[in-house]
Amino acid sequence: MSVFLEVSRFADLGGWVLETQSLSVLGGAYLMAHGVGRPVEDAVTEVELGAGVWKIWALTRDWTAAWGRGMPAGRFEILVDGYSSGPELGTNGEAWDWQYGGEVELEEGKHRISLHDLTGFNGRCQAVYLTLEEGDVPPSEPGELLEYRRKATGYEVVESEELLDLLVVGGGYAGVCTALSAMRSGVKCLLIQDRGVLGGCGSSEIRVWTGGLTNVGKYPKLGNVSALISPIDGTPGQVKSEEIFEDGRKKQLFREGKDLLLNEALIDVELQGRSIASVVTQNLRTGVATRRRARLYSDCSGDGVLARLCGCETMYGREGRDEYGEQLAPSVPDRQVMGHSVLWEPIVRKHPVSFPDIDWGIEFNDENGLKRFNCCWDWETGQYRDQVDEIEWIRDYGLMTVLGNWSWLKNRSPYRDVLSCHDLLWVSAIGGKRESYRVVGEYVLSQKDIEERIKHSDGTAAITWSIDLHYPDPVNESIFGEAFQSCAYHRGIGKPYEIPYRCLVARDVDNLFLGGRIISATHVAFSCIRVMRTLGMLGEVVGMASAVCKECGCLPREVYSDHWDLLRSRMERGISMNQAHGYMPGREESYHFMRPVGSVGNTNENVWIYFGEGGEEPAMHPSLRQAIIELGVTHKNGKKVE
Ligand SMILES: Cc1cc2nc3c(=O)[nH]c(=O)nc-3n(C[C@H](O)[C@H](O)[C@H](O)COP(=O)(O)OP(=O)(O)OC[C@H]3O[C@@H](n4cnc5c(N)ncnc54)[C@H](O)[C@@H]3O)c2cc1C
């Protein structure tokens, strides 16, 4: 007898963070004890077990083994009914594998299983396996493990009956703006987001400032949605507290459970010819997988998750100079990208604060340590790596260098007295990606288009950010072998430049839009498109285009070839995002009752009785008519209801 527990489904995650970024590599999410050196609260669940001696295994790894120094940083143990089952876990080497966690003798009944963090330094666990059999351990090879865990947890795909007009994957700026624009344009839309909050890089989980101007260029009404979801204060340079990112405000614009699903990840796709027939999404907290159908899809996942599952042609890294005639491209193409950043935020307390003197990861000392008392955009890793397949390592390298350098600053550096009251208030657990896979669309925008100001008849929202290319910092790279700092080259673009609609339409799949970081542009052109308000505006355009597709029964590419005037007029009008509740300018009179109408019912009904502009009386329930008579209001025409 055995029980396989996905820890992402534990009833209470305590202080453990649900990590979803490596889903496509690991086949599952994992929990991570991200406490910045302070052990986090237990993650807990209850499970029914028979009587016997249960052997306990954890699917885990030692994330600091990669740097071969000191004690494993992320250690934890498993508690059964509050008692440790045995050895410390998270000490089993670099690769994800099953580590033995001891055995416990139990009586039949419900038992409490807890992940108990010991260090606050990012111990991690995907699953717990309990078995009565000696030598019974699940496989660890990802393919076999996925098959095993699905069988063990009774994975099946539930069919959704609903036919959507548009399904949007990914709830960063691009996805949120796409979905809101579509919904306000009469499109039946569902936004799925694999995190528990909206905003992507612009959420409290990552805390990047929103950049780029809205409401500029040929269509100045584009940007209403993008501006609305941006933080009130967009000035870089102050402490980026959680509240500033207002995750909740973005969510309020949706009806969660109806047009928004959080903690829901796209995991599979079914194609019919050149079109997406359906997708499978999975709730990472419950494990429920659902097949969903839509006429149109928009991939705003930042990694091209949907487009890549469909087999669309992608671009990664830097194109060669000759490919698009770009002066800023390297002579030979390569896979160098702008890196991933684990942002962090210290505060100064009124009293001294300690930080552990850590012995793992790279050793920072007076020769190589960085005199950095706060963080900025330049803490950047993974420039030569695959931002999807290697994201765990990339994030870990960023995290390890933040923590290692801070530990040196606080404990051993010449600045330790100056920094005695400095406290590492917040470090992003997941970090943010600047660049990943881009997807080939109907047109690929390049440096030439922008700098030679090539006018495209399908121009849409305008870029205002400079060409902003990041490189691994050469000094940092020479010291550490692989850089965790970057530097940037900027070149202003002069005036706003409109991005062609065709960059938002996938070339290889007929019913797929491209949103956000993945849009069809070269590395150089992408460097100025990538800021959030701009990507948000492009999302607005996709939302409007999906309404044109619905109205005309056409495909995304036909909006450009056959129905351009319709999209243009929508872009001229913009999306109306009323920020206030106000009575509209008509001159008719009305009565407003909130009560059951007639003799039955005890719930409030929202009843409006409108009289015509000339005072014409509408049909109404006798009980309402009687109430209006009793009010005795004199109408514009001098008459009362009698
Ligand atoms: C450190 C840093 C500094 C930056 N500086 C600036 C700046 O100053 N100003 C600025 O405007 N921009 C800046 N940028 C760039 C900008 O933040 C990004 O380009 C932008 O946020 C990308 O938006 P997006 O919606 O395409 O992607 P994201 O914000 O990454 O959102 C994609 C969302 O999709 C979700 N997702 C992924 N896979 C799935 C799946 N399978 N199922 C469901 N959901 C999924 C992700 O969880 C994520 O929330 C910076 C970026 C970084 C990392």
Image (cartoon, rainbow, N blue to C red):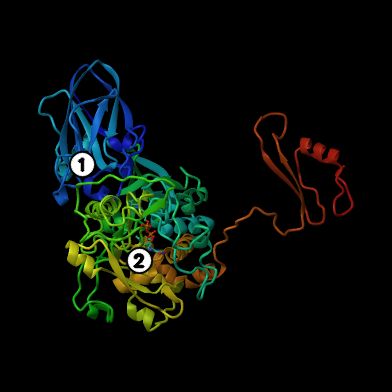
Q: Quadrant of the C terminus?
A: top right
Q: Which element type, helix, strand or loop, lies under badge 1?
A: helix
Residue 4 at x, y = what percent? 23, 31
Amino acid type of the residue tagged 1 in the rendering:
Leu
Work out whether 314 lies above or below 23. below
Using the image as rendered, state which of residue 527 and residue 286 is in the foreground. 527
Q: Quadrant of residue 77?
A: top left
Q: Which residue is drawn at 73% across and 58% down?
A: 586
Mark 1: give few (<14), some (14-19) or many (20+) Cα within 10 Å: some
Mark 2: give few (<14), some (14-19) or many (20+) Cα within 10 Å: many
Q: Residue furthest left?
A: 135
Q: How far apart are marks 1 and 2 (CA)?
A: 31 Å
Work out whether 306 lies above or below 525. above
Amino acid type of the residue tagged 2 in the rendering:
Ile
> Which residue is the site of mark 1?
146
Does the residue at mark 1 contact the one at mark 2 (Cβ under 8 Å)? no
Viewed as shown, does residue 438 lie left or right of 55?
Answer: right
Q: Quadrant of residue 582?
A: bottom right
Residue 477 at x, y = what percent? 20, 66
> Which residue is the site of mark 2?
519
Using the image as rendered, state which of residue 475 and residue 439 is in the foreground. 475
Residue 631 at x, y = what percent? 84, 40
Q: Quadrant of the N terminus?
A: top left
User: Which sits earlier in the primary sequence, circle 1 or circle 2?
Assistant: 1
